[in-house]
Amino acid sequence: MSLLAIMLLALAMSSDAFAVALCRGISLKSIPFLGALKIGVLFGIIEAITPLLGWLIGYIALQYIEKWDHWVVFAIMMFLGINMIYNSLKASNEDDQAQEQVSSNKKSFFMLIFTAISTSIDAFAVGIGLAMANVNIYFTASMIGLATCAMVTAGLLLGKKIGCVVGKKAELLGGLVLIFIGVITLYQHLTS
C-alpha cells in the first residue's frame, strides 16, 4: 500500500469522527483549544488501537483465507464505504439524540469514550483487511490516530462555523475513498 493510499485511508477513517465533532461543536457555546485537543487525543488513541486489534485478528485468520485475501479486503472496504455513504445521506435525528446524551456533565466522559469507540468500529474492520495487504500496521494505525486527533480537534473548533452539513459531506467522501481503495486493491491482485 502506497503512502498516498495510507494517507487517504487515514482521512477516510477519521471522517465519521470529524462529522460527530462538527455536530458536537455546534452545540457548544465555546470550547478552548486545549479542551478540543484533549477530546481529539482521546478519539485518536482509540481510533489508532482499533485497527491494530483488527489486524491481529486478520493476521491470525490470514493462513486460512490467503487465496481470497484480496476479495476479503475488497468486500470489507466496499461494505464500510457503502455504510459510510448511507450514514452520510440519512436524516440526522439519531445524531442529534446522541449529542444530547453527550452533553450531560456526569456521563460526558463515558459518552465521549462510547462515541469514540462507536466511530472506530470501521477502523477495526479495516485493520482486519490490512492484515491481508502489504502494509506496516504500526505506521498505518499511527496515521489513522493522528488524522483522527486532528480532525476531531478541528471539528470541535469549527462546528459553529461550518456545521453538520459539511460533516456529512466529509463522511460521504470518506466512504467513496474506502470504495476506491477496495477497488484498487482488488485490481492490483487480479492483474499481478
Image (cartoon, rainbow, N blue to C red):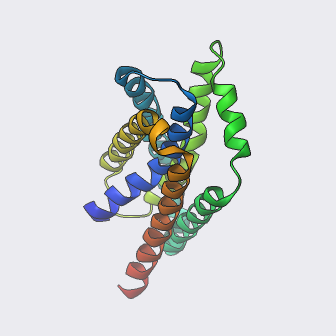
Tally the numbered discs: 0
Image: 179 above or below 187: above
Q: In the displayed image of the protein, which residue is found farthest to the bottom?
A: 191
The image position of residue 31, as x and y in percent, is 44, 23
Q: Residue at x 53, y 48 (%)?
A: 16
Image: 6 above or below 42: below
Q: Residue at x 49, y 41 (%)?
A: 50
Image: 152 above or below 72: above
Along the line of sight, the residue nearer the viewer: 131 or 171: 171
As drawn, is 182 to the left or to the right of 32?
A: right
As drawn, is 72 to the left or to the right of 144?
A: right
The image position of residue 167, as x and y in percent, is 52, 49
Residue 57 in sight from this viewpoint = no
The quarter of the rendered structure image containing the C terminus is bottom left
Q: Quadrant of residue 149?
A: top left
Along the line of sight, the residue nearer the viewer: 98 or 124: 98
As drawn, is 156 to the left or to the right of 26?
A: left
Q: In the displayed image of the protein, which residue is found farthest to the left?
A: 3
Q: Residue at x 40, y 29 (%)?
A: 41
Image: 104 above or below 3: above
